[in-house]
Every structure is written in C-alpha cells, then in structure tokens.
Amino acid sequence: MFHAIQLLAATSAANPLIIGLTIFALAVFVGIEIITKIPPTLHTPLMSGSNAISGITIVGAVLAAGEYPGFARILGFIAIILATVNVVGGFLVTHRMLEKFKSR
C-alpha cells in the first residue's frame, strides 16, 4: 500500500489533490476495517482514547479554520463540529457506562 503512494507521488504529472484523495480513501478503508474488528467489551476504554484524539483534532481544526482561507476554513469548521460531537458523545457514553458500576 505504501509503495503505491510512493509510486503515485513519484510521477511528475501527479496532482496533489489526487494524492491527497488517495491517502484519504486508504485511511477511511483502514479505519473502517479496524473499527469493525473491535469486540464490544473494548468500546468503552477505546472511547476514552477517542476523546483524547478528538481533542487533538479540535485543536488542529481550529488552527486550520483560523489560518487558511477559503475551502480549508470550511473544512476546518466542519472538523470542529464533528470532533466536538464525537467528544461530547464519548463523554456521555463513558459517563453512562461508569454509572452502571456505581454501588447501589
């Protein structure tokens, strides 16, 4: 897979947009394959890690939305919204799971 990206990047006629879309498509495919293989017992601990990663995504999205004009600003704003929804949802799920372990 990495060799295909190197070969694509090595050609002088390669469009940076095509290279970026190829990397994005591969990342989506790998992400879906990894997520579908996770057993349900690991979802809550992984949600905590996902919240940390989404927090980093929010920082990067804020920088992209503020620094770059045009389409990057729109993508940064969309990334801020999606990462915020992911963080809030992750905290709600984690809080709900921790409530199950409280002593009655």
Image: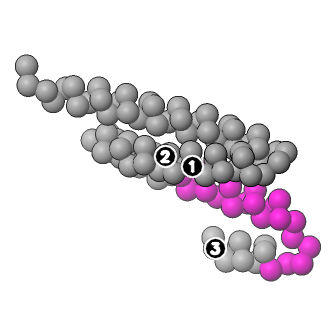
The Cα atoms of the two marked residues, 3 and 1, are separated by 28 Å
Q: Report the residue marked by disc 2.
A: 55
Instruction: Name the side, left or right, on which 47 lies relative to 97.
Output: right
The Cα atoms of the two marked residues, 1 and 2, are separated by 7 Å
Residue 14 vs 38, above or below: the answer is: below
State the predominant SS element of the stretch in magenta: helix
Is residue 90 in view? yes
Instruction: Name the side, left or right, on which 83 lies relative to 104.
Output: right
Q: Determine the image quadrant of residue 94.
A: top left
Which residue does the image show at 76% across and 40% down from the upper left?
Answer: 74
Q: Secondary structure at mark 2?
A: helix
Whether pointer 1 and pointer 2 mark residues with C-beta atoms closer than 8 Å, the reply is: yes
- Assign the C terminus to one quadrant of the image: top left
The Cα atoms of the two marked residues, 3 and 2, are separated by 28 Å
Q: Secondary structure at mark 3?
A: helix
> Where residue 9 sits: x, y (%)?
78, 74
Residue 59 has which mark? Answer: 1
Residue type highlighted by circle 2: Gly
Instruction: Name the side, left or right, on which 23 lies relative to 52.
Output: right
> Where residue 93 sits: x, y (%)?
35, 30
> Where residue 42 sits: x, y (%)?
30, 45
Residue 24 forms part of the magenta stretch: yes
Q: For label 2, count other residues whose C-alpha is less than 10 Å away and answer few (under 14), some (14-19) or many (20+).
A: some
Instruction: Name the side, left or right, on which 96 lies relative to 56.
Output: left
Residue type highlighted by circle 3: Phe
